[in-house]
Structure formats: structure tokens, C-alpha cells
Image (tube, rainbow, N blue to C red):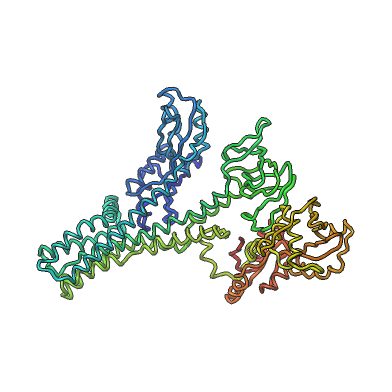
Amino acid sequence: MTEEEKKKVEVKVSGMTCATCAQTIEKSLGGMNGVLEANVNLGSEIATVEYNPSKVNLNDLEGAVKDAGYDVINEKVTLKVGGMTCATCVKTIENTLNKLDGITEVTVNLGAEKAYVTYNPRATDISQMKNAIEGSGYQYLGVEGEDIEDLEKEVREKDLKKKLNRVIFGFIVGSFLMALMYIPMDFPKSYLMLVISTPAFLYISHPIFSAAFRALKNRNLSMDVMYSMGIGVAFVSSIMGTFKIVLTQDFMLYEASVFLATFLTMGRYLEARAKGRTSDAIKKLMGLQPKTANVIRDGAEIEISIEDVQIDDIVIVKPGEKIPVDGKVVFGESFVDESIITGEPIPDMKKEGDGVIGGTINQNSVIRIRAERVGKDTMLSQIIKLVEEAQGSKPPVQRIADRVVSYFIPVVLTIAFSTFALWFLILGQTLTFALTAMISVLVIACPCALGLATPTAVTVGVGRGAELGVLIKSGQALETPDKLTTIVFDKTGTLTKGKPEVTDVISSEIDEDKFIKIVASVEKNSNHPLAEAIVRKAKEDGIELFEAEEFDTFGGKGVKAKVDGKEVLIGNRTLFKDQNIQHQDFEGKIVELESRAKTAILIAIDNKMQGIVAISDTLKETTKKAILEFKKANLNVVMITGDNKRTAEAIAKEIGIDTVLSEVLPGDKANEVKKLQRKGRSLRLWVMA
């Protein structure tokens, strides 16, 4: 069979609680004719299957998962379809969509002109459905606005609610049964405890016994089999003791049975809740992608779905909108906030010929972009893919855990029965004592920490890292920090806050508050991020601003306006030189501020320089302490930045970093890390926000 004939699909699975569950699904899938390989990741709850499509299809694979006792989570979407006239049209569309890999169920409503589709988003997508509908001669009219359902979230929330209800009910009944043991009564308590505990025990333990039955049906010894034996033996022993069948009424373990089932359910509730949070980072990253784009088609501007944007389309992006695709500016210029990708706090000026990244935010002017990378090829999509792959990767310790779990359960069962035999048959202890010892072994000996904790930790760790701006490329990377000798930090947004703030106000003749009031009154008319920092400073100080008149800008140099009858000029040295305004008296202070990594903004009033406002991306409060802790751990700390050497060294000196790589372009930072690795340093962690 050639590689082209093989297919690979990912299936989202729910209901797994330990590594044995994953192995059960792998066996169920692997036993199918046509399945070449099946791997199940417990942490991400995804089964990856390689198969021969001529022998088996996706519905068969999902059926095998369900036959093993687990659920498959798909998504549901409502598509609007035009051009249908009769029942034959309905059948045609249903058959057409059902031929797509990944479609689980299709129902078409002729009267409403809608197709209700349940599908696997990892095997197909909306654009393929659109092409199939249009290819069969009908009109694809888009997705019903609010009818896309996140079935995964819905199933998970229902499951969590059921588990929580069982836990609460179990604690209430168990506590009452325990209290009964200390209340004197005129009739045997055992009968009352039997009546109270039976419905509670059946309600709480039903999922555990059902899972055990499915496991045995598939000839598999799962943790549920062990749990069922433990709580089942305890409850049945209590019934036998109540009616004095072989056992005496000393075997009153009703409250223990209920509490054991409750604690097991509570553990699974906590596990399910933890796993439910692992996909949040991916969803947040996906939320950065705009849903629509404005493009020029046939000379007119139209709004289309992001899935319909094609390479070489001219995309119009207005102020405040997210850029939908990766491409190049072909018309206009504007500041673009790229902090979600680069961490740089100050928006970058983009003009004709400059590249832009999808998901970043256009700030102040309309620009037109030629699309170069769309859909899954954009940088943001690649980052999302990187995080997904990292969450699904297995570190070495997890592979060891998977092997251990496969042998663990038979060994534990052997030990449990041997414990009973030892105490009862050999050492002559009472039946009560021997049964209690056996039940303890069955219930306590749970390898779920091995089978579940590691994949969950990897998935949550990688996901949380992505939320904080740290992309971890594999699970194995999480195990290497103990071998590190060097750690490299990017400056902006990692060591610093990533947000420009006013740090110094220097005025020669005017009161500081009045000085800031005049400067901010001019800058409130500007969209420049440094201007916004000054206005923000005035607002924080509670300063009311003047109305500025005759506002004008000097591209890349500064601005001017009339405020309170005075002409105010704000900008850099070049602007002051062009306007013949002397600033030599302040030159020493300007150089000093720049040596401390601050941007000096010069201010002149009525053609005379009156002062300086210094702005800087300030250090995070935790930076110095963090660097100190890394040094205590004997790590060599390196800072890498695009800043000039003087600025970079000033910041490094302030926070205690000895090694600085300055004036490094973003595209060259990876090469600098490789150079350090070639020098023999174990460098595996590169932290960037």
C-alpha cells in the first residue's frame, strides 16, 4: 500500500480516566480491518488513527471508539443552502456531504433551506462543505449566525454537572449513614442502613460499574474493574452481614461503600475539570483571528468570511481592525500593534512594501494589503499548530508510565487476592479483617497518577505557557531544564512590561504639572503610542487638558499646535534642528536619559526649548528578583534585544545581567541562540513573551 493511499485522522474522545482507557481504545481501533496504526493521547483526549480508506471509514472508527464504551466529540454547524426545490435535492446534498471524510451526520431541511451537519473539525472544515454543496449545483449561503455549537464544551459541562451532583449526594448520604452508627435504636440499624444506602450507592457507582462492564466485555482489565471489585465487595459484604449469610453483622460497611464511590467520583470530577481547561490556550489564540475580511472583488469592496480569502486578494483594513492575513502593504501607511506576535509594546509604522502579520491590530489609518499567506499558512495558525503538537507530544517519563500501567493492574489484583489468602487462610485472621485488607489494596492501588498526571501536566503546562506568551515546542522540552547552563531572555515584554510609560519630566521654567498639561494637550490629538503615554500620565495625575488649535504633524519627527495662546513644538533633535531651535543646554541630560534606555522627547514653547519628557518601557516588578533566582541556580543569564549597545547595556546593568546581545534583528535571534549552543552551552530554553 502506497503512502498516498493511507489516511490519517484525529478523533476527539471523552470518558477516558486513566492510561488503561487509552489502551482499551487503541486495542478496539487496532483490531479493525484496515487500521494500520492507532495512538491515543490521554492528556489531550485525541485518538490519532492511520488507516486504509478502501477498507474502513471515519464512521467505522468512531463506532469502534463507542463500542469500547467511550464517546466521540464532534462539532455541529447549520449551513444555509439555496436552490433546493424538492426531496431529491435534499437527498443529493445529504449524499454529497456524507461523502466527505469527517462528516458524521447530515440532515437537510427543505422548508428552512438549512443543512444540519455534525462533523469532525480535524478531518474536514466549512470550506470543504461549501465546495461540495456548490459542486453539486446548489448555493452555499453561509453559516447560520448563532447555530454553531461547541459540542465538546456542552458534553464536558453536562458530565461535570452529573459528577458533581453524585459527589454532593454521596457526601450527604454517607455522612447520614455514619451518624446512624452512633444513634441508639430499638431495631437493627442494618436494615435501615440498607434501605438508605442502596439507591445512593447505585446512583453514585453506576458509571464505575458500567465502565468496568465495558472493559471486561472488551477483554480488558481497567481501573474501573479494580474500583468495582473494591466497592462491590464492600457493599455485598454488608448485605450478606445484614441477612447473616455466611457473614455476621460485624460487616456493616454501607457508609464505607458510599464514601468510597463518592471519593472516586470526586477524583474523576477534579480530573475532568483540569483536562477541560487544557484547550483554553488554543481557543484564546484562535480568538485572535478575525472571522471576516473586507476585500476588493470586481472593483468593489465586499465583506467575506476569512475562509474565502485567497492569495493575492487585496484586503482593506480599517483603523482598530485586526489584520486577517499575512501579506504586504500595497497602499497607505499606519501604525500596527504587533505585540501579540513580537511582544514589542510600541506599534510599528507600516508603509507600502512592508510585511504585516495576521491577527495584529491596525491602529490609525486605512491600509490595503496583498494577501500572501492565508488560512493554515499564516504565522498565527502555525503558532496554534505548534502549541497543539506540543500538547500532544509524549515526554520520556510518560512513555515509561504507559508501559508500567499495562503491567500494574494484573499485579495489583494478584496482590489483593494474595493479601486475602495470607491473612485469612495462613495467618488465621478473621474474615472481616482479611476482606478489609483486600478491599484496601484494590481501592488504594491506583496508577492513575502515572497514567493521567503526566499527560495532563504536559497539556496544561504547554497551554498555560502559550497563554503567557511562552511557546514550548514539545513535551520533552519540559524535562530538560535540569540540564540547562544558559537561559536567554528577550527584553521587550519579557523583562519589561511591554508598555511605554513616562519616567522623567524635566522643565526649566514651568511648574511640572503645568508643563505636562501643555504637552498632553497637544499630544491628545496624536495617535502615536509615545503621545498616548504622555496623555495617560496626565489623566493618572488628574490633570484637565486644554483644547489645542492648529495641530500639525511632521512625519517621523514630531508635532506642533497652539495651546493657551502659546505655540508648542514637540519632537526629536532633527525637528528642532529643522526649526532652528537651540537645545544644546539640554544635550547632556538628553544623552544621560538615552544611556538609561529612555526616549527623550524635546518640548519648545514659543520657539524656546523648555524641557524634556522621557519615556521608557519600564521593567516588570518581578524581573530583578527572577534574574537573581536564576543566578542562584547557577544559570548563565543572557539578554537578547534589538536595542543599541548603550541602551541594552544600561538595562542589563540595572537588572544584573552580565551577557548582552544587542542590535539583533528579530529574524536573527534564533541564529544567536544556535551560536551559543555551538559554544558548548546546554541551551534548550529561550524565553520570549
Residue drawn 83% across the image and 68% down it: 586
Residue 349 coordinates in the image, percent (x, y): 73, 51
- Write down the quadrant of residue 234 in the picture: bottom left
- Write down the quadrant of residue 225 in the picture: bottom left
- Write down the quadrant of residue 577 in the picture: bottom right
Please give the count of numbered marks on the rendered protein.
Answer: 0
Between 554 and 243, the residue placed more toward the observer is 554
- Res. 663 in view: yes
- Res. 230 in view: no
Q: Is residue 8 found left or right of 488 in the rendered image?
A: left
Which residue is farthest bottom?
632
Between 262 and 379, the residue placed more toward the observer is 262
Residue 308 coordinates in the image, percent (x, y): 58, 37
> Dividing the image into 4 quarters, which one contains the C terminus?
bottom right
Q: Is residue 565 found left or right of 121 in the rendered image?
A: right
Q: Is residue 69 found left or right of 346 in the rendered image?
A: left
Between 349 and 475, the residue placed more toward the observer is 349
Q: Is residue 27 found left or right of 347 in the rendered image?
A: left
Which residue is farthest right?
580
Residue 171 coordinates in the image, percent (x, y): 28, 63
Residue drawn 25% across the image and 66% down it: 175
Between 282 and 616, the residue placed more toward the observer is 616
Which residue is farthest front?
565
Residue 279 coordinates in the image, percent (x, y): 48, 54
Q: Is residue 440 above or below residue 53?
A: below
